[in-house]
Structures are given as structure tokens and as C-alpha cells.
Image (tube, coloured by chain):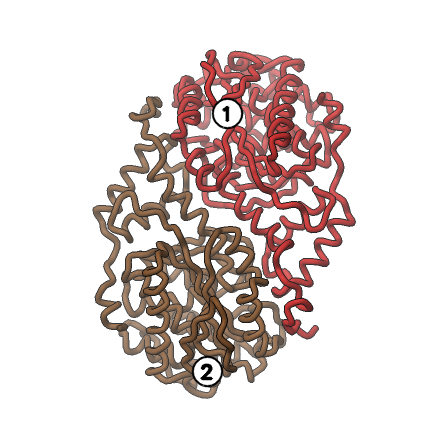
Chain colours: A red, B brown
Amino acid sequence: MLAETLAAIRPADPVAVAEARAHQDRLTKPRGSLGALEEIAIRLAGAAGACPPPMPAPAALAIFAADHGVHARGVTPWPQEVTVQMVANFLAGGAVANAFAAQAGVPVTVVDVGVATDLPDAPGLVKHKIGYGTADLSQGPAMTVDQAVRGLEAGITVARDLVASGARCLITGDMGIANTTASAALISVFTGKDAAEVTGRGTGIDDETHARKVAVVREALQVNELPSDMSSASEALRALAAVGGYEHAAIAGFILGGAAARVPVILDGVIAGAAALVAAALDPAVPDHCVAGHRSAEPGHAAALTHLGLRPLVELEMRLGEGTGGLLAHPMVCAAVRVMHDVATFDSAGVTEKPE
Amino acid sequence: MLAETLAAIRPADPVAVAEARAHQDRLTKPRGSLGALEEIAIRLAGAAGACPPPMPAPAALAIFAADHGVHARGVTPWPQEVTVQMVANFLAGGAVANAFAAQAGVPVTVVDVGVATDLPDAPGLVKHKIGYGTADLSQGPAMTVDQAVRGLEAGITVARDLVASGARCLITGDMGIANTTASAALISVFTGKDAAEVTGRGTGIDDETHARKVAVVREALQVNELPSDMSSASEALRALAAVGGYEHAAIAGFILGGAAARVPVILDGVIAGAAALVAAALDPAVPDHCVAGHRSAEPGHAAALTHLGLRPLVELEMRLGEGTGGLLAHPMVCAAVRVMHDVATFDSAGVTEKPE
């Protein structure tokens, strides 16, 4: 399934990109006056291979939940059971992601790819459990390469199922106490930046915990003997298995699944950024199919987005995860594309163009 | 009408602000993890005098259109008739503001407060014409103080009518070729910043035109002998009349009308920022009722927002006006408030709180 998905991914269509750029300049607005939104619409035209690109609606949010063995190292003050408690909160509709999703009219699917306990069946919950939390990445590989591939395939399956149900835009979400530690390790590996530069304070930690978190990320990179060159797919898979989480694997697969179906993927925060680095290492055309929903307060997120060549739409110092940043961005992405569909040209509206 | 409106405006309610802040900390999310959005929800609680604040929906956009005598000075390459052509485009649904409004589900009202020609009646067009374009602000006052007051009252009337029709959030929009020149002059007067610091390239001008525009703004400030202290309402009115446009007067009134009705106002770009400075000079509680929808590429806009103490939600280098930045921000403002209504508390959801 992974190989078949990778084979289906195409880079941006240069003809559609050129058409979209020319069309932007014919619309009744000063050239370039929609700033970064014009680039979003052009990007989606390239991804879809069509100008105008299809409206990225309806959208669907998938929140991938998992636990992390590295939690035992004291990298966060939050107890591990908060992961499963928040899954229950998502399923009951009580989390911020639910409020944002209701506002945006986006359905929420919660995917258990590796929380530490068994979950009762519930509407909105999909089970693709790879394990009961990862192993401690600072002691050795967090998971096997086989588990990493199963995680990727779980994400591909969720993307396929949502697209089959009519979704025309996928939004990534995550839940996993300690998952910013795994994200920092992945971002350090894939961007080549030092652990101290890409390790942040997650959902809120003090100086002492932060110093420990940086040290743990360094240990993880050393003990797993990861190479500095991540250009081969097999090395990328080994890095994902060594320092990733099940939700990182699944989100990377979810992104690949969207790209293969030519359905754009709005990335949420630092966890999605780390997962997108993995996906982009597996296929360099991946960023053409992604939109960076926001930039979180985590320093590693900015490094990941720079590496991916993506500019975030929302920059409000959010640091919640769950898909909240992606959900906030979705109406803007729709607005950017709707301009290509609805707005009159200077000719059609009889508006005088600025003399050159 | 103006005096009565000013008398009705209340500053933020400190009790509602404190309640909203405390409520944010009880919700199932790490404290402060929604970044600037938490402050928006708290601000709207203060403005409404209620926690949670009412949902800022449905919203209504009013695009105030007018022409400018200073156009004769060559401050823009766009011909003056583009103002009336774009009014026709708004009424036909073909402009970017229409596309964004359709996306956000926001109805559009176009208000003629001073375009240079008479407009035929049309659905969605409201006429409160103060004049056929202003006089050239670089030669003397752009309008009389009486006209400025009529402009303010036109904006108040539009705000009242929209609120009476059910609007629970007002979004400012503008159309007027050359109106960034008047905006720069107002912003220079009200912030005390030099003309060169606050005069930008509007919808796109070359270096030579930009230098002329800065010189014209300087002349306007000199010829109108405006004082450096704008603390009195009478001086603020005189400054508005001297260097403003009819749409600036009307938008200032629209903001006052929203504030008086305790209905929040989402400000669009630099024209709204300039108008909000006028409104805030008339009543210092005005910013409590405003949300800065975005920050445009115009340098004067940042100066205005800093002076008003407002942080913009969207920063995508847009420079179109029409209300486009305000429309993009509206779903985010709704999401921020919806969190206060919908999200579970740690207690109610049975989620373990982070140990302090």
C-alpha cells in the first residue's frame, strides 16, 4: 500500500500553476493584493493539476492519538493518562478541536494508532492500533520499522476512507502526551538542526524540564545512531521508527494518502510539521500538496516549515495541537480558492485596469 | 445622534474580563495555548459585559465608498472612475469582497457616502451621499466639519440599521481610489508619526509616485495647520474634516455605532485603522469594542494598530481593502468565542490537570 501510494504522487503541474498565476492577474484587484493567499490558490491549482483548483471542501479532520515511552523520562508535567482522557473528550465533543471543527463545519474522526490502553468502541473513533505506546526513544528505537510502515499505512487508509466519503481537503490533528519530544527529535534529524534549536516548551514546561527534554532528544539521536543524510527512503523510515511516534507515522501516511488522491492537506502544528518532513523524505513532491495551517509557538515548527518551503497562514502563538491551527486556516484556504472561481476579471466587469 | 451615540459607549467591563480570563484557565487545554485567540475572547467578553460573550454572528459587512479630490495630485495610477466601477462590481457580486463574504456567509451592504457621480438604485446599495468626492486635502480642508459630522452620522445609521436587522458583528469595508493618501494623513496626525513613516504604496505605485504621495501628505498637514495634540473631540473632528475622506468619517461612525450597541466591530485595513483613530479620539473606550482583522502591507496600518493597542489576527501582506481582511478574520473571532461556549472544563470532562 505504501509503495502504491508513493507511486501515485505527482509533483505540482506547471501548466496549472502558470494558468493560475495568469488568472490571478486578470481578476478585479490590484496585482498581488491578496498577498500570501494568491500563492495558496496557485499552489492548490498545481496540486490538483487544474485551474481553478476544486474548492477544498468539504474538509475532514483526523486526530491521530498515541502514547510515548519517552514520557517516563519526565519531559512533560502532564500525566500520560491525559492522552486517553482527551480522546474521550474529543469523542464527547468537549475539546477545543471540536469547537473549532463545529465552527468550520468539519467532521472529526479520532484514530487510535497507539494509546496506552484499550478504548471502548464509540462513534467517531477508528482503531488502527499499532501498539500500546511506543518504547522510550532515548533508550533505543521507539518502534520497529515494520510498525512504522503499519503506522504509515494506517494514515493512508484513513485518508483514502475520508476521500471516499467525499472529503476534498484533509486536516491533520494529533493527541499524545510527550509527542513534542518525538517531534523535536524528528525535526532535528530531518533538518540537521541542533536539538536545542528545535526543542520547545510544548504545552508548557519550566526551565529544568526543558533542559531535560533537550538532553533526552540528544540522547535519542545518539543512541539510535541516525545518519545526518536523510535522502534515502529507507533511512527516513529508520529515523521515523527510531525517534517518531505512532501518530507521526500515521500523519505522514495521511499526508501521503491525500497527496496521492490530489486532495490538499492542511498541516496543523509541530507534530504535523515533523510528520510532513518524513513524508517529504519519502516523496519530494509532498510539500506541493500541503498547506501550512499555522505556525505554533514551538521553535522546531518554524524549522520544519522552512525546510518544507511552506509559509504558515495563521501565526497567533497557538500551541495546542489537536488540529486547531489547521481548522482555523481552512476557511482562509477556501476563500483563496473561491476567489479563483467567483471573482470577475477586469474585462468582464468593465473595470479600468491600472495603466502600466 | 453623534452625542447620543458617544454617551452610550461604555469601556470594557472589568468583571466580565476577569471572569473570561478565569474561565479560559478552566478549559481542557493547556493554559494560554490558544495564544492571541484567548485575548480576543476575553476582549469581547469585556466589550459585551458578559462571560461568555455572545457569539459574534451573524456578521454584516458595510463597504463605504467615496471619491477624493486629492486624486488630482497624481497620488495613484488608478483612474478615479474605478471607484464607481468597483461599486458596480460589488453590487454584481464580482469582487474579492463578495467571494470572501460568500465564503463566510456574510451579507454585503454598499454605502455611497460620496462617490463622484450619481448611482442608480440597486439592491444592496444604500445612499448617504455627503458630496461628490472631497476637496483636495493638500489645498485646504477636504470637507467641512458639518460634512464630517454628517459622515459620522451616516456610519452610525448604517450600524444601527444592521444591528436592528440582527447583525451581532460589524465588519468595515471601504472603496475609494486615493483613499490611502487620506488615511496616511489621518494616521500621521493622530499618531504623531512623520508622513514618510506612514505613507505606503497603496494598491501599487512606483518610487516617483510614492515620493509625490509623501509630499502631498506633508502639504496637507501644513496647509490645514493641524495641531500635534488630538486629545479634544473638536480637534479630532477638525482633523477628520481637514484630511479625511467621506468613507473615513462614515467608518468612524460605523465603529461608534457598533460600540454604542455593544456589537463588536472587526476592522479591515489601513482605511479602517485611520477611521478607528478618529473614533478613539472621540471616545477612548472605542478600541475595547474593536478587533483588528488583519495587518495590511501599508506601513501606516501598523502605526495605527499600535496606537490603538490592537493586535491583528491575519498577517498575509494583503493590501486590497474592501473589507477582505475583516472577512477573513471573522471565522477566527467566532472560533475564539465558541471555545468559551462549547469547551469542557477539566472538572466536567474528567481530564487530569497539569500539576502546578
Image mark 2: chain: B
Q: State the image quarter where residue A144 is shown.
A: top right
Q: Chain of mark 1?
A: A
Q: Is residue A34 above or below residue A1?
A: below
Look at the image and tell me whether residue B349 can be seen: yes
Q: Is residue A114 above or below residue A124?
A: above
Q: Nearer the viewer, mark 1 or mark 2?
A: 1
In the picture, the disc for residue B247 is none
Element carrying mark 2: loop
Q: Residues within 10 Å of mark 2 (few under 14, many from 20)?
A: many
Dot 1 and dot 2 residues touching (CB under 8 Å): no
Q: Secondary structure at mark 1?
A: strand
How many C-alpha atoms fall within 10 Å of the one at disc 1: few (<14), some, or many (≥20)? Answer: many
Q: Amino acid at mark 1?
A: Val
* Quarter placement of the N terminus of chain A: top right
Q: Amino acid at mark 2?
A: Thr
Q: Position of residue B57 (x, y in %)?
A: 38, 50
> Quadrant of residue B10 in the image?
bottom left
Instruction: State the image coordinates of residue B92 (x, y, percent, origin top left).
Output: 56, 65
Q: Is residue A147 left or right of residue A16?
A: left
Q: Work out whether residue A50 or residue B164 is closer to the camera in this orientation and state it.
A: B164
Quarter of the figure that contains the C terminus of chain A? bottom right
Q: Is residue B24 left or right of residue B175?
A: left
- Residue B134 - label: 2
Give percent across and percent down for residue A289: 67, 39
Up-down: is A242 above or below B92? above
For disc 1, the marked residue is A110
> Who is closer to the viewer here, A124 or A329?
A124
The reply to whether residue B188 is visible in this rendering is: no
* Residue in the picture at 30% in, 32% down: B26
